[in-house]
Amino acid sequence: MHEPMMEFRPRTWVDRQGRPEPLVWHEAAHALVGYRLGMRVEFVDMTGAHAPCPSCGLDETTVPETERARATGLAALAGPVGESMANGRDPLWRDDGHVAHEAARSLAAGVDEQVELVCDWRREARRMLERDPAYVPLVHVLAERERLTGEELETFLREI
């Protein structure tokens, strides 16, 4: 019996010119920044296998507790920052922004200080992505393969 859904592919993650879609940049940025900050990356998935949309599984408990809030905020903001670097527009930050603001709230009591932390983290995430030679190659690999395990990501980053 032929299973038509077995051949179903939800979409391609590159445009007609072969450029990866902004969401690929977004998820690759989460994974790369999280990894560089000491988080264990469980997966990066564009297929929707883990959630109804592309996602990146990060384990922040692998970061020392004294650095965890900063690392969590930076990794959360890296996604929207990477996406905006790809398409020149600021994406909606709903979930990622909420995670970053919660992290800032754990480090600063006042709203002004929290907003300043989030702005600083956004700038730092951008600098990290711009300077990391693995970012662009990672985006292209993720666009092609659609899913990387944490082990595959680590192997790829060690080879760069």
Image (cartoon, rainbow, N blue to C red):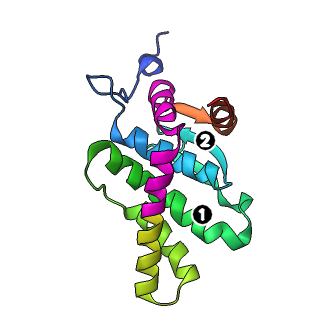
Crowding around mark 2 (Cα neighbors within 10 Å: few <14, some 14 to 19, many 20+) is some
Q: Which residues are magenta?
A: 123-146
Secondary structure of the residue carrying numbered label 2: strand
Q: Residue at x 59, y 33 (%)?
A: 148
For residue 51, say whether it is visible. Answer: no
Q: Residue at x 49, y 67 (%)?
A: 99
Amino acid type of the residue tagged 2 in the rendering: Phe
Q: Which mark is residue 43?
A: 2
Which image quadrant for residue 10?
top left
Does the segment drawn in magenta span residue 143?
A: yes
Is label 1 in contact with label 2 (beta carbons under 8 Å)?
no
Question: Mark 1 and mark 2: span between their CA atoms?
Answer: 18 Å
Q: Which mark is residue 28?
A: none
Secondary structure of the residue carrying numbered label 1: helix
Tell me if residue 10 comes above or below residue 107 in the rendering.
Answer: above
Image-based side of 14 in relation to 143, left or right: left
Does the segment drawn in magenta span residue 124?
A: yes
For residue 97, say whether it is visible. Answer: yes
Amino acid type of the residue tagged 1 in the rendering: Ala
Q: Which residue is mark 1?
A: 71
Crowding around mark 1 (Cα neighbors within 10 Å: few <14, some 14 to 19, many 20+) is many
Which is more toward the observer, 32 or 61?
32
Tell me if residue 67 comes above or below residue 142 in the rendering.
Answer: below
Q: Residue at x 36, y 47 (%)?
A: 83
Which image quadrant for residue 62?
bottom right
